[in-house]
């Protein structure tokens, strides 16, 4: 008798929880909006993809130039002139590491974004939204890398300004 | 084809038997030679004419080699192209390629890029370091940083918000 009661409770619990789980992922309103605006959403995503590709090429070029033509040669020359500091070397390593991380994070982000753009948002609005959230997380990582690289380059400028003061 | 050759073989076997019979007869008879000649004539008449091998189109050795070369080179080209494309995708270089259809830079963008391009500068890795050299270095570094920062809000998190994409906000779910 107890067993039957337990099974009854379990089935009732599962029946109640299942729709809550589905609604928890995405609301009906959101699902309808994704289906209705599917093409417009895809256009926006493609535009974002293009803009991000442009940003990657521009920023990647500047990071590479700053690292290879400014940071590394200056640190080598400072060592030669016995003016180097641990902060400068550490900062160079930080920029270099963040640059590699930026490149990798961007590729991961673009892969996810491409998958999202190719998804059928009319047929699978829930999966589409789930993937969209994953893409947002990847984009956040790239955005964080850009901020950190910007900070590293600013630190380099400030550290060299200190060296300049020493040379007066 | 096999049937035909088997049939022909049977006929030849029969003929051999006939010849053997004639030969043995020739030994026994006194008019041996003339009898053998007559028998041979009969055999010649009864034998079917051999089919000409030239019925099938014949490919010369050089032609065959040329075909092998063509097919081989096409297969090698396909293989190397596939490997190249796989590397292009797996390495992520495809996402940096702005010559892809739909990713080509606009005309204005190219002009803008040419205008904002900082002056080419090479800082020597060796030599004495003076205040003037550091000043010049900082001037050029500042130009690079300014050009880099001219790119407004790269990877702005707002680009993929629900609002921007036209999806109602999550708060509206409970309504």
Image (tube, coloured by chain):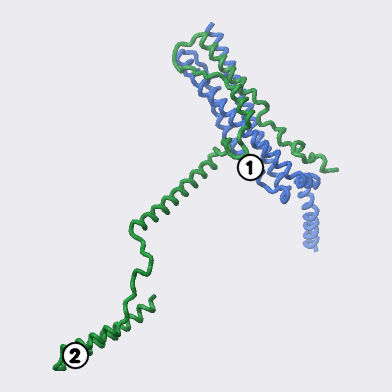
Chain colours: A blue, B green
Disc 1, disc 2: CB below 8 Å? no
Q: Secondary structure at mark 1?
A: helix
Q: x, y (%) of residue B138?
A: 56, 14
Residue B141 versus residue B155 in the image, above or below? above
Name the residue located 39 percent from the left edge and 56 percent from the top edge.
B67
Q: Residue at x 17, y 90 (%)?
A: B26
Q: Chain of mark 1?
A: A
| Location of residue A115 (image quadrant) | top right
Would you place residue A44 above or below residue A12 in this image? above
Which residue in the rendered view is the most extreme toward the left?
Answer: B30
> In the displayed structure, does residue B40 sit left or right of residue A145?
left
Quarter of the rendering containing residue B145: top right
Q: Which residue is mark 1?
A: A114
Q: How many marks?
A: 2
Among all residues in the image, which is located at the extreme right?
A: B175
- In the depicted view, which residue is nearer to us: A32 or B75? B75
Q: Nearer the viewer, residue B38 or B133?
A: B38
Numbered disc 2: what chain? B
Residue at mark 2: B35
Closer mark to the observer between disc 1 and disc 2: 2
Residue B3 in percent (x, y) is at 39, 79
**Real-space Cα distance between discs 1 and 2?**
94 Å
What x and y, as percent, mark residue B58? 36, 64
Left or right of A85? Residue B162 is right
């Amino acid at each position: 008798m107890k067993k039957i009661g337990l099974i009854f409770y379990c089935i009732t619990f599962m029946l109640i929880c299942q729709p809550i789980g589905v609604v928890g992922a995405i609301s009906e309103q959101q699902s309808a909006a994704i289906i209705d605006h599917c093409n417009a959403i895809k256009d926006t995503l493609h535009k974002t993809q293009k803009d991000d590709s442009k940003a990657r090429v521009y920023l990647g070029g500047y990071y590479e130039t700053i690292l290879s033509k400014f940071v590394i040669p200056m640190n080598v020359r400072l060592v030669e002139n016995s003016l180097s500091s641990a902060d400068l070397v550490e900062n160079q390593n930080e920029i270099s590491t963040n640059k590699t991380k930026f490149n990798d994070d961007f590729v991961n982000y673009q892969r996810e974004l491409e998958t999202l753009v190719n998804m059928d948002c009319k047929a699978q609005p829930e999966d589409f939204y789930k993937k969209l959230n994953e893409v947002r997380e990847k984009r956040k990582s790239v955005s964080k890398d850009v901020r950190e690289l910007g900070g590293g380059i600013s630190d380099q400028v400030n550290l060299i300004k200190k060296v300049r003061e020493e040379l007066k | 084809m096999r049937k035909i050759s088997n049939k022909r073989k049977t006929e030849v076997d029969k003929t051999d038997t006939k010849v053997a019979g004639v030969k043995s007869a020739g030994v026994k008879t006194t008019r041996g030679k003339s009898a053998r000649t007559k028998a041979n004539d009969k055999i010649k008449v009864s034998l079917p004419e051999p089919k000409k091998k030239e019925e099938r189109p014949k490919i010369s050795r050089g032609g065959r080699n040329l075909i092998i070369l063509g097919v081989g080179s096409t297969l090698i080209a396909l293989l190397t192209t596939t490997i190249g494309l796989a590397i292009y995708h797996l390495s992520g270089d495809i996402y940096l390629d702005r010559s892809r259809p739909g990713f080509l830079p606009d005309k204005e963008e190219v002009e803008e890029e040419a205008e904002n391009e900082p002056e080419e500068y090479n800082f020597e890795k060796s030599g004495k370091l003076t205040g003037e050299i550091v000043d010049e270095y900082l001037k050029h570094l500042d130009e690079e940083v300014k050009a880099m920062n001219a790119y407004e809000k790269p990877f702005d998190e707002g680009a993929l918000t629900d609002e921007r994409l036209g999806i109602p906000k999550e708060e509206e779910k409970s309504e």
